[in-house]
Amino acid sequence: MENTKSVNTKKIGDFLLNYSLYILLGLMILIVISINPKFLSISNFMKILTQASTRGILALGAAGMIVLAGTDLSAGRILGCCAALTASLVQSVTYASRMYPGITSDLPVFVPLLASIVIAVAFCMLNGFGVSKLHLHAFIVSLGTQLIAFGCTCIYIDSQKGGAQALSSFNQTFLNVVNGGFQFGSFTLPYLIVYFLISAMFMWVVWNKTPLGKNMFAIGGNTEAAAVSGVNITKNIMGIYIMAGVLYGIAAFLEAGRIQSVNTGTGLNYDLDAISGCVIGGVSFSGGVGTVPGIVIGVVILQTINFSLSFLSVNPYLQYIIKGLIIILAVSIDVRKYLSKK
Amino acid sequence: MGSSYEVAIPAADSSAAGTGGAVVLEMIDIDKQFPGVKALDHVRLVLKKGSVHSLMGENGAGKSTLMKCLFGVYREDAGEICIEGRPVRFDNPRQALDNGVAMVHQELNQVLRRSVMENVWLGRFPQKAGLISHKKMYEETKKIFDELGIQVDPNTVIGKLSVSQRQMVEIAKTVSYNARILVLDEPTSSLTNEEVGHLFRIINKLRDRGVGIIYISHKMEEILRISDEVTIMRDGQWVATRNADGLTNDEIIKLMVGRDLKHQFPENTNMPGEVLLEVKNLTGKYAPTCTDVSFSLRRGEILGVAGLVGSRRTEMMETIFGVAHRDSGEIFLAGKKVENKGSEKAIKNGFALLTEERRATGIFPLQGVMFNTVLANLRAYIKRGLLSDKKMRSDTARMIENMSVKTPSQKTHIRYLSGGNQQKVIIGRWLLTEPEVLLLDEPTRGIDVGAKFEIYQLIIQLAGRGKGIIMVSSEMPELIGICDRILVMSNGRVAGILDLRENRYENVQEEIMRLAAKYV
C-alpha cells in the first residue's frame, strides 16, 4: 500500500512539474478573480492577449538566441528603431508636419513592413556576425548593438524638420491593418492576436520541422558535437539571427500601429520582457532547451501579471517587486524539471 | 565539522591489516527502483577496515547507483547502510564527507584556476583571527603530501598539473577530511603505467592506515593487483564476493557477463578488397598535430591505430575528417582526390568520425534518441521543404533494432542511456549518412565488456560490407583482436604498420610498444 501511495504522490508531483506553467497561469487568474470578480470578462482577456502580441512576436525571435545559449539585449532598441522607420513611412498624408512631405499618397502597407524587416535583419546580422564569426558572447555583441540601434533611432527621429518629436498621425489603412479585427457578431478578434498566433505557428514549424530548427537545438545543446556531425555552425547561427530579425521587424511594424506614436523611448526594456517571457516559458539559459508553446504561455503569463496588477490598482512601485518575485518563482519551478532527481 | 581543520590521518592499525579486519561499512539488501527498471535488487557490500575492495560489473550493473545510495545522492527504497556498526543515512555527499566517507570521481571537480591547497581546503579554509591563514593552509597541505609521498607544491595552480597529480591532490583532500571510507571511481582511466604505479603506492599507504577503499574499475589486471576482495555485480544484483587471491581474469568475466566468453573477440574473416583511401604526407596546421602521415586503407579492412597518449592519433583523425586544419598532404578516396573542408564536406565525401569524448563531442544530452540519431543526416528527411517525422521515426526504429539499443522510447533523453547504448546510437547516427570510410576514435571507451563485444561485431560486419575502417584505441588487446593491420603512431608520425593477417599474436604487443616509443 505504502508503495502505491508513494508512486501516486510521485506521479502527482511530476504532473504538477510538467504543467507548472499552466497551473501558475490558472492560479494567477483565480487569485485576481477572487479579489475582483469583474476581471473575468472576454474583453479583458482580449486586452491581455493584444498587449502580449507584439512582445510575444519579439520573444519568439529572441528565444532562438537563448536556445543557442546566448541572449539578446538589443531586441527592444532594434524594435524602437524599426518602429520609428515604420512610423515615418505611414504618417497620414494630410498631416502637415509629417517626416516625408514628399510622400503625397499613402504607401502600400507592405513597404513600411518590408523596410522594418530589412533594418531589423541588418541589426540581427550584426549580432549574428559577432557571435558566429568573431566568437563574442551574445550578451556583449547585443549590448553593443543595443547602443548602435538606439543611436540610429535618435538620429533618425531628430532628423525631422521640426526637430525631435514623436512620430504620430498615421494613415487609416495602416491603423486598420494593425488594430482592426475579425467581427463575429458583437465579439471582435483583434488581428494582433491572429498575427501573434500565426507567428507562433510559423516558428513552431521552423523549430520542429526544418533542419535549421534541429541544428539550432544541436548547437545550443552541444556545439562541439554539432560541429563534428556536419552542422555548419556559422550558417545556422546566422539563419537563426536572420529569422529573429524578420520577427523583430514584424513586431516593430505592429507595435508602431498599436501605440500610435513612436519616440526615442519606444522599445525600452522590451528585450527584458521578451527574455523574461522566454525563461518563464521554459527556455533554458544554458541552451538547447525550449518550446514554442512554452514561450507563448510565458509571454501571456507575464502580460497577465502586468495587466492584473494595474487592474487591481496595485501601487506601481509594488508592481515591479511582485513581477520580479513571480519571474523568479516561475523559473525556479521550471528548472526542477532538469535537475537530477533523487 | 565547523572550524576543526586539524589533520588526523588514521593511525596504522595492525589489527586491521589483511582481510581479517573489522568491518567498516556494511550495505545490506539495498533495493532501488527507477521507473521501469529495478536498478538495485538486494545488493550487499561488506567493506573491511584497511582493505581494498573492488567493485566490478558491466556498465549498468548498478555500481554507480549503489555508490549514489551510499552518498545520499539517491535514497534507497529498502536495505540498511551501517558504518562501523551504526546505521547511517546521508542526505548528500557533503554530509558523507563530513562523516569520513569520501569519493574521488573519474571526472575531477576542481577549481582549476586556484591553487592546490585552496582546492584541498575549499569550504573550510584554516583561519586565524577571522582571516584565512595561508601559512597554516600550506603547512597542513604539505604535511599530508609528505606523508603520502606526493611531490606537488601546494601553491601551484591546480590547472597546471597533470590529471594524475590532480587525482592525488583529490585523494590527499579525502585524507584531510580524515576519511575512513574512500571510493575511487575508475581512477586509472587516463593514467600512464608509471602513474598507476604511483597511485597504487598511495592506495597501499592508505590501506596500511586502516582506510577501507572501494575501488571501481573495468581493468582486471589492476584489480587483481591491488584488491583484497572483489565484489561482482550484474543487472543490479549482487553476484559474488571473492578473495582476490586465486581469482582469474576469465573467472571475473564469467561472473560479470554470466556466460563464458569463449573468445574475447569475434573473428574477423573479412577479405579486404581494392584500395579505398589513400593518405599522402598529411600534416596538420596547428601544433600539436600529426606530421607527414601516409598510409592506405582497403575496402573491408580494419586499420587499427596504436600509440601512446599524446601520439596525436586523435589529431590525425580530425585532420583527415577536416575538423582540424590541414597544412599539407593529400587524401584520395577511391582514386579521386578529396578536400575535406569541415565536417559538412567530409560527410558528403563519405567520411564519418566517431569522436573520442562521447559526452563532450558526441551526444546531445538534453535531446531524445531520435534527435541524436538523425542529426547528421537531416538532409535526407526533407519532404516538400519540411522534415518528415515519419521517416525519421522509421529510420530511428531501424537503428534501434539493428544496433540492439536498449531504450524505453525514441523520445528518451540520451543522457539516461548507458554508455554502451549511447555509443551505439552515435555509431547508428553515422551509419545513416552511408559513409565509405569510418574513423572510429576509441569506440569502446567507457563501455562494459558485453557492449564492447557487440561493438566489435558491428565493426567487423561493417568492414564485411565493404567499408574502410580506421580505429584508434588505447587498448592493445582489442586492436590485436580485430584489426587487419595496425598503424603505430609516435609523436605525430607513423612509426610503422604491422600486418596482423600473417601473425596475430606472437610478439605483436612488444613490437607495438617498441614502435610507439620510436620518435619520443
Image (cartoon, rainbow, N blue to C red):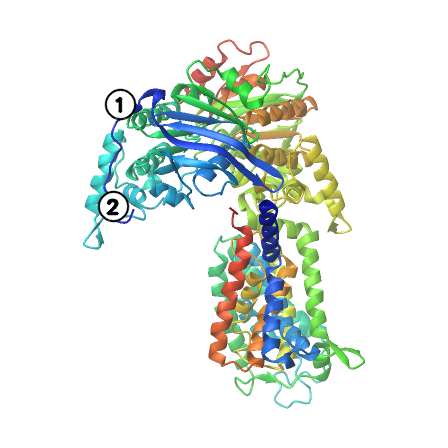
Asked whether A142 or A197 is in front, the reply is A197
State the residue in front, B375 or A102.
Answer: B375
Q: Does label 2 lie on the same chain as label 1? A: yes
The local crowd at label 2, few if under 14, some if 14 to 19, many if 20 or more residues have their Cα within 10 Å, is few
Q: Residue furthest right?
A: A185
Q: Amino acid at mark 1?
A: Ser
Q: Where is residue A2 shown, x and y percent of the image?
A: 58, 46
* Residue B257 rendering spot, x and y as whole percentages: 57, 23
- Residue linked to disc 1: B14
**What kind of element bears circle 2?**
loop
Q: Is residue B275 above or below residue A230?
A: above
Disc with the residue nearer the chain's start (1 vs 2): 2
**Looking at the rendering, which quadrant does residue B280 occupy?**
top right
Q: Tag 1, which secondary structure? A: helix
Please state which amino acid type lies under the numbered disc 2.
Ser
Q: Label 1 lies in what chain?
A: B
Is B238 on the left-hand or right-hand side of A235?
left
Q: Say if residue B286 shows up in the picture.
A: no
